Structure formats: structure tokens, C-alpha cells
Amino acid sequence: MASSTLSIFIFSLFLFSSFSNAKSPQKPKAFIFPIKKDVTTNQYYTTIQIGSNSTTFNVVIDLGGKLLWFYSDDYLSAASSYHPIKCGSQQCKIADGVGCVLCDSSPPVPGCTNNTCSDYVLNPFTGTQVYNGLGLDVLRVYSIRGAQYRVKRFPFQFSYPDLREGLASPTTGLIGLGRTRISLHAQLASTFKIRQKFALCLPSSSGKDGNMIVGQAAYDNPFQEISKSLFTTPLIKNPVSTDMNEQVGNFSVEYFINVKSIKVGEKTLSLNKTLLSIDKKTGSGGTGIRTVRAYTGLERSIYRALIKEFVKAAKSMKIKRVASVAPFGACFNSKTIGRSKTGRKVPTVDFVLQSKNVYWRFYGSNSMVRVGKDVMCLAFVEGGVNCCGPTTSIVVGGYQMENYLLEFDVASSRLGFSSSLLLHDTSCSKFGAS
Ligand SMILES: *[C@@H]1O[C@H](CO)[C@@H](O)[C@H](O)[C@H]1NC(C)=O
Ligand SMILES: *[C@@H]1O[C@H](CO)[C@@H](O)[C@H](O)[C@H]1NC(C)=O
Ligand SMILES: *[C@@H]1O[C@H](CO)[C@@H](O)[C@H](O)[C@H]1NC(C)=O
Ligand SMILES: *[C@@H]1O[C@H](CO)[C@@H](O)[C@H](O)[C@H]1NC(C)=O
């Protein structure tokens, strides 16, 4: 090729690419979602806008949820752009639907359409499940710079009013952040070609919102500085689904971390190590992480060991124990507990991960909860009971995640977590990016 032809060719390529860049809006890197806490239920929720009329409502955030489900009269009555996912379609494969429903309504309405790809959704508070068709509609999202974008075909289940029982009253459904291809971050990642990653910062009170940032972004300071020195630990897959509707052989959609030991102050609890790892055959054991559990739940023997050591360490700090208030097993007279910038001055509780230098340390703000005038309790509960599926020994709950910066890098299966933001003189209510 003559060099002049080549340079014309290159020149026109350059012209073409700069032209198309100028025309298309800037490619977003990350999206932001506000997080509120409902103090009645201790649930965390965000606000979404869905449908051609951008019906706006709140949904509970579930780290271990598969997908978005909701019931909303407003959505039904707005002129919606709902489309059912057809059985056998590519979308149905992505949604991993387990069946096909016939629902004969004329005209078709969201949640009742013929030949529709279907799946179970779970209300994690009541244990109720609903099997229904899945659909698609436009989801409006906001980049960290405040620009609006649309996910044209966002998957969800339009469910039944009854399934909302037990949800925080400002909410009408639940949004999943689990390991599926139809969770919020997975859909944003595939639509906008961004990294499958989200940062979660849960607020500790109702008046102060936290934020979730999906994608890769430079945070506002001091969070950008804090994010440079996060502890990191692998996010583990449980080879047996904790969802009883899934067949054996399916990975769990929940996230697990490898807690190797627990310390109270400098003292390591003596625990049955079998409970701390996931049994690859049954899926039992190990440590999950769920925003839909108010407090961290511990299998009975772990729970008892923690209470015993904590009470002992508190006593040596002259903290006076009082009668327990259910569901908590160790309560104290708060007048006998000092204060610090990380909450009440109590023995620290550490979840030690893959090495002794990687630990999640809980101070008073995350380990003590007020239950009455002058009474505060150790904010851990006895857990590890499950009627029908594998039993997870430890489930880290929302109260223990508040005011930590948590980065779920799903793409590389790693969790990054900060030390308590209170140590850095900040909190999740200031978390953002621009
Ligand atoms: C939906 O939006 C259209 C256009 O903005 C409006 O005319 C219509 O009244 C809306 N419908 C409902 C039910 O809100
Ligand atoms: C739905 O499917 C059933 C069974 O195939 C059929 O009898 C019915 O006419 C269909 N309804 C609509 C609205 O297409
Ligand atoms: C779940 O298991 C079934 C049967 O083994 C398989 O066909 C399906 O692809 C699995 N789904 C996922 C998400 O792994
Ligand atoms: C440890 O836990 C496992 C799993 O629950 C149990 O089978 C085993 O008996 C326990 N060992 C002891 C010493 O309690």
C-alpha cells in the first residue's frame, strides 16, 4: 500500500473515532446508590427507579440475594414497559430460571404472562418463597458524577404483595447482590462493561445515609486514602448451595470468608475448627456475610465461648454485668462502661482471617447495642439453625458491618475491608465518589 493511502486511511480512522467519541456520552465507570437504615427492623435499603415512568420505590439490600423482586401497585398502574422473559430464551439462561409458567391473563400483566421463564425468590426474613415468572424493564441508574443512565432490560420478578411481610415498612421488595448473572452489580458490569465490583458502606443510624458504589472509582477523601490500605481476604464459594431449591452441584450465591479464629482482646477462643471451614460435601460450616441479618449469628458452641470470654474480659475492666435481654446473652450496666471514639470501651472482638495479621476488629460501636436505659448488650446472637439446608456456622450481620468500607471485588473474588471508619474520624454517611 502506498504510504499516502495508508496515512489517509489512518487519518479517516482517527476522524471516525474522534467523531463517535464526541457523539456518545462519556462511558460511566461507577454508579452510586444511597443506603438507608430502617431502625425498626435494622434492615438496610436503597431506592430504585424502574419502568418507562420511572416508578420509584425502596428495596432491601441482600448481599446473598439472587435478583431483584418487588410488588408495587404504583408500578402496576404506571404505563410500564414490562416484558416477560420467554422460556428457553438466552435471557432465561442468564437468569438461570428453573421452570416455565403459563399464566393466562388478557391483557398480560407483570407477573402473569404465558410461557414465562420462572424462578423462586426468597424472603430471607420469613423464609417464604415465591415461584413466579421473571421479566425485564428499564432501570434508571446514576453515575458517581450524577449523570443518568438506563439499563434497558433489567431482570426481576414482579412478585406477590404477601411476600413483603417482614420487610422494613418503607420498602416493597429486595435487591440481590449475590453471585449470579442477574444481580445488580452483574447487570451493571455487563451493560456498561465495568468491573464486577461494589463498595458497601452501611450507615449506623436512620438520619445518615451510607452509599454503595458499583464499579471502579476513586472515592472522595479520606476514603480514597483509606482504600489504599484495606485488609484483603478471599471471597470463598460454597460448593453446595444454601438455597434448597437449587440442585446439589450448584455453588451458593452467597459470599463466604475464611474466619480461622476469634479473639477477645488478646485471648484466642478455643473453638471446634471443623465448624469454621465449609464441608465440601454438605456445604455446612464456614462464615457467610449477609446484610439481611441484623446481628452476627454464631453456632451455639462458638457463641458460648465468645460470651464466656467477653464477660470475663469485661469484668477485668470493671464493667458490671446485668440480666440478659433476649436475644442477647451478655448485657451490662452502661454506666460502668467508658467511651472512646470507636464507641463504648469494651474488649475488642477480632475475626482472624487467613493469617494473624489479617483480622476484622470490632470495637464497642459494632459490638455493643443499647437495649434500654443503662443497659447495653454484646451484639452477637446464637445462630446456626437451619431447617432444611446446610448450616453456616457464622453469619456476619449488618450491625458488625456498619461504618467499615467493604469492597466486594467479585471479579477477583476478594473482599477488601477497612478498619473501623471511626478510627479515621469519619463514617459511612460521608462515603462517596465524584
Ligand atoms: C406515565 O408517563 C407518561 C409520560 O410522562 C404520562 O403521560 C402518564 O400519565 C404516566 N402514567 C402514569 C400512570 O403515571
Ligand atoms: C396461554 O397459554 C394457554 C395454554 O397454552 C392458552 O390456552 C392461552 O390461550 C394462552 N393465553 C394467552 C393470553 O396467550
Ligand atoms: C446448577 O446446576 C444445574 C445442574 O447441575 C446446572 O445445569 C446449572 O447450570 C447450575 N447453575 C449454576 C448457576 O451453576
Ligand atoms: C466439631 O464439629 C463437628 C461438626 O459439627 C462435629 O461433628 C464434631 O463432633 C465436633 N467436635 C467436637 C470435639 O465437638
Image: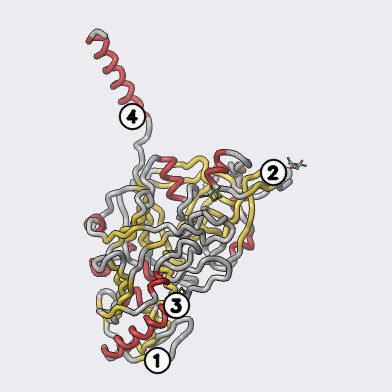
Q: Nearer the viewer, residue 364 or 25?
A: 364
The disc at residue 314 is: none
Q: Amino acid at mark 4?
A: Asn
Q: Which residue bears the numbered disc 3?
A: 381
Q: Which residue bears the numbered disc 2?
A: 114
Callout 4 secondary element: helix
State yes or no: Cβ of the residue under disc 2 lies below 8 Å from any atom of ligand 2.
yes
Task: Give the x, y percent position of residue 149.
Answer: 43, 42
Q: Earlier in the sequence, mark 3 or mark 4?
A: 4
Q: Amino acid at mark 1?
A: Val
The disc at residue 322 is: 1
Q: Earlier in the sequence, mark 2 or mark 1?
A: 2
| Disc 2 residue crowd, few under 14, some 14–19, many 20+, Cα 10 Å | some
Q: Nearer the viewer, residue 422 or 416?
A: 416
Spatial CA span between label 1 and label 4: 67 Å
| Disc 4 residue crowd, few under 14, some 14–19, many 20+, Cα 10 Å | few
Point out the image quarter for the N terminus: top left
Left or right, 135 with respect to 316, comes to right
| Disc 1 residue crowd, few under 14, some 14–19, many 20+, Cα 10 Å | some
The residue that appears at 36% across and 55% down in the rendered structure is 408
Left or right, 346 with respect to 83, comes to left
